[in-house]
Amino acid sequence: MNIFALSVSAILVNNFILSRIMGLCPYIGVSKKLDSAFGMGMAVIFVMTLASTITWIIQHYLLVPFNIGYLQTIAFILTIASLVQFVEMVIQKMAPALYKSLGVYLPLITTNCAVLGVSIININDGLSFIESVLNGFLGGVGFTLVLIIMAGLRERLEKADIPEHMQGMPIAFILAGSMALAFLGFSGLKI
Amino acid sequence: MSSFKELTKGLVKENPVFVMALGLCPTLATSTSIVNAVGMGLAATFVLLCSNILISMIKDLVPSKVRIPCYIVLIASFTTIVDMLMEAFVPAVHKSLGVFIPLIVVNCIILGRAEAFASKNNVWNSALDGIGMGLGFTLALVVIAFFRELLGTGQLLGFQIAPLSYQPVLVAILAPGAFLTLGLIMSIISIMKKKSQSGQEIRG
């Protein structure tokens, strides 16, 4: 699989939010302001890339050789939880400014199903090491792209005149639905 | 609070999906047909029930600093059990739910109930709470799946409901249909809430 095809597929066609429907909690929760959406997106790219790298190594050098593949779920969630914790401590020590802007979002990422999702999908699809790392990174980029578009739309929506019973969550979902409809068009791409 | 209330509050009043907006990813991703919805709902109910019971048993043994990792390991173990059981007994449903079965681990309803309810209440009430919340989740999934399956295929549980001349709206069982259906259902709920509130005001 060449890199261009992989990136188009991971960012647009199989977008984590709009096509695979993963990571909706931050998508709905953190998309009210453009700044915080950007911060969350960066944190997710970072963690998804690292998580794909490490879980691939764990799967192929720990779980498979010792024949304990059934522990996959437990091993992966523990890896991700400790990874997030570790990343948080390192950033706090090395780059306090970055920590200030990402700080709030890092703990939330443990329960973001896109991170665990991308790790399991990498294994299920039998991707190689390089492809897994790329898939994690590009999946994060796609996530950020959609999150930022959504935040921009919702900032405009604040000024719009919405029927009373549609305010809040319902209109956010309708908006997400329309975006998913638009992204559905990408599935026709043939590379 | 009576045991009966503990059991039924999850169904409507504190419905995890429609009222508290938790566990949205599996809700939208697996509600493409009623069979999938029931499969996912019952799998999550099983994990929720077991984890609630066990967590309320060990709540005094676990130091509060490490409680979240402990809960996650417990939940992950039960998820693995469900994964294996479904693969053995209902392979078709297991295949169509795919990656969303291991993702039960990160379903916020389960960790949310562990943290908000099971770690503060006794075993019996936690078990009832687990069943109630699990069934509420299943109910929400089935409601969404009902509309999506009917519109998207013209069938329900494999039986033809709509007349054969009906052109299925394929988009309803794809991702956009999930978002639109949930948005519309939530707006209907907010209208109903508004009506019942104004009714109470008049009576009061």
Image (cartoon, rainbow, N blue to C red):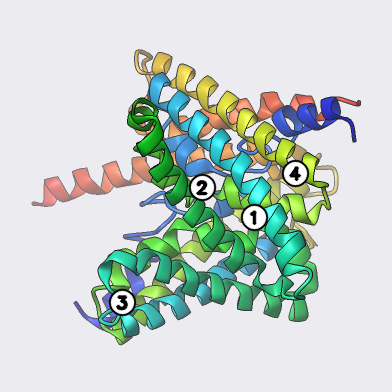
Q: Amino acid at mark 1?
A: Thr
Q: Position of residue B14 (x, y in %)?
A: 33, 60
Identify the disc placed on residue B121. Answer: none
Mark found first going from the N terminus, 3 or 1: 1
In the picture of the structure, the residue carrying the numbered disc 4 is A132
Identify the disc placed on residue A112. Answer: 2
Q: Quadrant of residue A23?
A: top right
On the picture, is B162 further left or further right than A190? left
Mark found first going from the N terminus, 2 or 4: 2
Q: Amino acid at mark 4?
A: Ser
Q: Chain of mark 3?
A: B
On the picture, is A7 further left or further right than B197? right
Answer yes or no: do the residues labelled 3 and 1 have beta carbons within 8 Å?
Answer: no
The reply to whether label 4 and label 3 mark residues of one chain is no
Q: Chain of mark 2?
A: A
Q: Residue furthest left?
A: B204
The reply to whether label 1 and label 4 mark residues of one chain is no
Closer mark to the observer between disc 1 and disc 2? 2
CA separation, marks 2 and 4? Answer: 18 Å
CA separation, marks 1 and 4? Answer: 25 Å
SS for callout 4: helix
Q: Residues within 10 Å of mark 3 (few under 14, many from 20)?
A: few
Closer mark to the observer between disc 2 and disc 4? 4
Q: Chain of mark 4?
A: A
